Image (cartoon, rainbow, N blue to C red):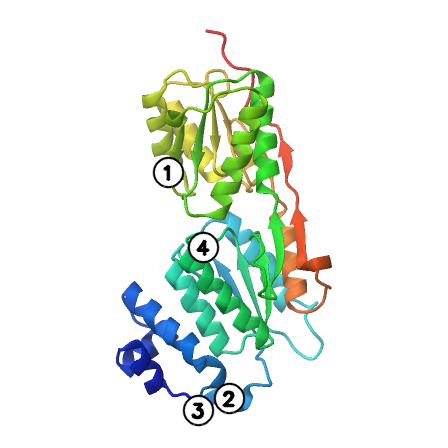
Amino acid sequence: MTVTLADVAARAQVSPATVSRVLNGNYPVAAATRERVLRAVDDLDYVLNGPASALAAATSDLVGILVNDIADPFFGIMASAIQAEICGPGGRAGGERLAVVCNTGGSPERELTYLTLLQRQRAAAVVLTGGAVERAPHAAAVAAKLRKLSEAGTRVVLCGRPPVPDTGAIALTFENRAGARALTGHLTGLGHRRVGYIAGPEERTTTRHRLEGHRAALAAAGVEELPGRLVHGRYDRRSGHEATLELLRRDPSLTAIVAANDSVALGACAALRESGLRIPEDVSVAGFDDLPFSVDAVPSLTTVRLPLAEAGARAGRIATGREEPPPGGIASVRGELLVRGSTGAPRTS
């Protein structure tokens, strides 16, 4: 029996127009309503068995690339590299594919909506970039979506995300823990003991993994982690600026600050200069990712380089079937510690 839009609406207890709005993403819908509609879509298997069932054996030439923030160089670099592999001259014989970048704005609900839309379009491949939200209901919903995509013949690649077991998704995962441990270990090796840390959003896997690496390095150096030396914020410059002022208010004796990423580190540097502090003579600053502006900052940023373009290109090749997936469907992507002018030995007074 064919499942209709009206069936989904009845299951979700909304109007057919609301279901259409959720699936088309062309009108604001309350988060709770969107979740109810998407759950009904999954329960009834509407996407797979709806009016387009006659096309079930075929996938389109569409490839979806999900990013949290296209304005963030971290995501822009990966998306550009993925798109180049999908749409460039090295694309599949007989024609190019259409790469569509889906900007979630960091919204978990928007992420699920895009996955549903790509499933409806029978996308040839979907590439999800960056860290994942760890809230259990959302993680379960994403896993269910990825599983349905894979079962329908869509290649699913995670670039910079942890693996999602039993979904058929290929994972190229960044070694954030190891990179963060090396970064903080560099600072403790210089003699820093009063180290502040500006972390990203608490619910993100990238945040947790980098914070775990930082804590491991502190423990290895015998440095006590004090609660007042940790602030969570967004992955942007403004957050770094605000968080640094807060850290200095809590503990003016800090000699080093580790930032969640390079954009946050730039904000930290600005706040330190505004406070009359020199970098690195008074306070050392370290970032993460090695974004293009990092080497041109004054002083240039000590950071961990992640091969974002290389990882994105590989994800694009796997997504288009031009490169074999790694053994077991999982590959670790290492970072490289780059020591530059923003870190030095702590002040003696």
Going by the numbered disc 4, the residue's amino acid type is: Asn
Extreme top residue here?
A: 349
Q: Residue at x 34, y 67 (%)?
A: 35
Going by the numbered disc 1, the residue's amino acid type is: Ser
| Residue holding disc 2 | 53
Give the mark nearest the N terminus, 3 or 1: 3
Q: Secondary structure at mark 2?
A: helix
Question: Measured from the top left, where is residue 2 in percent x and y?
Answer: 44, 91
Going by the numbered disc 3, the residue's amino acid type is: Thr
| Residue holding disc 4 | 68
Give the mark nearest the N terminus, 3 or 4: 3
Quadrant location of residue 321? bottom right
Quadrant location of residue 93? bottom right
Q: Secondary structure at mark 3?
A: loop
Quarter that holds the C terminus: top left
Question: Measured from the top left, where is residue 255 in percent x and y?
Answer: 46, 18
Give the mark nearest the N terminus, 2 or 3: 3
Give the mark nearest the N terminus, 1 or 4: 4
Question: Measured from the top left, where is residue 200 in percent x and y?
Answer: 43, 41
Quarter that holds the N terminus: bottom left
What's the CA distance linking mark 4 and mark 2? 31 Å
| Residue holding disc 3 | 2
What's the CA distance linking mark 1 and mark 4? 16 Å
Quadrant location of residue 61? bottom right
Foreground: disc 1 or disc 2: 2
Give the mark nearest the N terminus, 1 or 2: 2
Q: Which of the labelled discs sits on residue 239, or is there none?
A: 1
What's the CA distance linking mark 1 and mark 2? 47 Å
Q: Residues at badges 2 and 3 in contact (C-beta under 8 Å)? A: yes
Q: Residues within 10 Å of mark 3 (few under 14, many from 20)?
A: few
Going by the numbered disc 2, the residue's amino acid type is: Ser
